[in-house]
Image (cartoon, grey):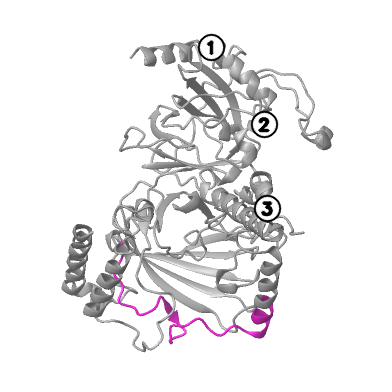
Amino acid sequence: MLGRTLVTFGRTVVLAAAVAGVPGVAAGQSTGAAQDYTAPRTPDGQPDLQGFWSNQTYTSLERPDGVTAAYYTPEEVAARVSGAAMRESSQTVPGTIPDVHYDFTQFGLDRSQSPRAENLRTSLIVDPSDGKIPPVNAEGQRRAAERADAQERLGGRWDSAESNQLDDRCIMMVPAGPPMMNSGYNSNYHIVQAPGYVMILAEMIHDARVVPLDDRDAPAAGLSQWVGLSRGHWEGETLVVESSNFNAKNPFRGSSERMTVTERFTRVADDRIDYRFTVNDPGTWDQPWTAEMPMQRSRGPLFEFACHEGNYGLYNTLVGARLEEQQAAEAAEQVRGR
Amino acid sequence: MAVTLAVSCVAATVPMSAQTADYRAPRGPDGNPDLNGLWQALNSAHWDVEPHGAGPSVVRDLGALSAVPAGLGVVVDDVIPYTADALVQRDENRANRLRRDPAIKCYLPGVPRGMYMPFPVQILQSQQHIMILHEFAGAVRTVYMDDHVPAPADSWMGWSNGHWEGETLVIDTTGFNGMTWFDRSGNFHSEALHVVERLTRRSPETLSYEVTIEDPNVFTRPWTMQMPLYRRVEENAQLLEFRCVEFVEDLIYGHLRKQPQE
């Protein structure tokens, strides 16, 4: 245990020193870090975003309560990272069953060991300026209540597959997007470009989004999808992707099927893409809101993430829940029989 | 080496009738033949890769809707050269296909089955990586055009290394987990499966797809399938979502649903 923690901590110290020692990170403060950087071009002339990237971060979407500054100092970031890394690595005890699955120093669960773009922001949200998601409007509140009712009618989480969470069911996980959010681990992406297309593959559940770059019409409203439908174009150095036609079965932060997401990918260094997204959903918020997070170049390749095919977790939990019910029923029967 | 020779011999005897020999593919911006696009098979190989007559549906209530259409077959020389034991296994698979076909459960379809299911397949071609993206189950294959390494682990879709031979993209795939089938009729393989695919443009709107299958646990010799793949020429053609996991949850987990208490 001690040895592991020291390894983790040693890495954290190195990272922290790197943050403090690189003026570009502090001065650039995420957006437009290098105005004079021009991305290399693909053979067909697109700015080249290809390769393996991670949007892993310790920065929360919303600014923590009690924090008012838009940026931490490098020292504050270093302290937060090392504190979080210590907490993550000490979550399990060596030699125990949880440790086999969740050894936070071995399976990419320790974020401090993942490729991770340093970010001094106190929230990923840059607009509104308070770093918080705008208040949910009346329509959004009404829908949230309806959804809560519908979920309750489905039963408890372990009553059936359908009443469980989407990630436990291997249907959707957060990195897929849009917008692409980071998750506790495996926040990894593979971008490949071909003439007329950009493909963004999220490692989690092998979710590939193929974005056409021609000026084809937006799809009709009758066609909705879990991940919506994306259309892209280049604005100078920036790839702009507009997505609509969400089925709202995986509502991002409570959004409706009217949500549109505008994503902007700008390569600002050999090892960094600035990723910015704006969420617009008049059915939920009276104003659009925007977040920004860097993507850091990481090492490939991505391995197959056959989530559903190996989903023993869901099966076993349902078996366990039914067994517990059976045992409880038998115990009750015994009490009655006495 | 012996294995390689065996494969080449088979390939050499295959009549290349599907291919227009003098067609030269347009070049992509990197100078390689341009295979980009959405492609789809138009045959009944997904029912049965061997020649077969029409047959009834295995689900009575689906009647004619899921009855099996006849097919001329895509196997060169018509018959898959199973070992005697493997042929028994195939027939048993076939008799129990409603329960055993892994694709019914929305599992990743494997190679080459994903290439001729009745769903589009998008090829997205860059110099380093060629992506093969299947609408069915959102299956994805990355073909590594450099940095060739042996398969690092077993998987459903295998590990694909590719290279160009003139007009042809050759993809060598290993590292399978042995859990996929070739079609809905129980034709199967083991984890020793080795697949070599050859994709060649044969006209502006068609590809020639040829795939050699080798698996000494199951077959007495390597064998080959051939078929054209057709371009989806609709101007707005694109891959759509077929996230089938939610469609099979009741099938897989329905018996574990909480029953109403009395």
For the N terminus of chain B, the image quarter is: top left
Q: Nearer the viewer, residue B48 or A317?
A: A317
Secondary structure found at label 3: loop
Q: Position of residue B77 (x, y in %)?
A: 59, 11
Q: Chain of mark 3?
A: B
Q: Nearer the viewer, residue A126 or B156?
A: B156
Residue A18, by quadrant, is bottom left
**In the displayed structure image, the side of residue B91 where residue A240 appears, left or right:** left
Secondary structure found at label 2: loop
Label of residue B257 in the image = 3
Secondary structure found at label 1: loop
Q: Position of residue B7 (x, y in %)?
A: 43, 15
Q: Amino acid at mark 1?
A: Thr
- The CA distance from mark 3 to mark 2 is 39 Å
Instruction: Nearest to the eye among marks 1 and 2: give it.
Output: 1
Q: Position of residue A193 (x, y in %)?
A: 43, 50
Q: Nearer the viewer, residue A185 or B48?
A: A185
- The CA distance from mark 1 to mark 3 is 42 Å
Q: Would you name the residue on which mark 1 appears?
A: B83
Tag 1 and tag 2 share a subunit: yes
At a point 61% along the width and 13% down the height, the residue shown is: B79
Mark toward the start of the polypeptide (1 vs 2): 2
Q: Residues within 10 Å of mark 2 (few under 14, many from 20)?
A: some
Q: Amino acid at mark 3?
A: Arg
**From this viewpoint, is residue B119 visible?**
no
Label of residue B42 in the image = 2
Residue A266 magenta-highlighted: no
Q: Name the main secondary structure of what is drawn in magenta.
A: loop
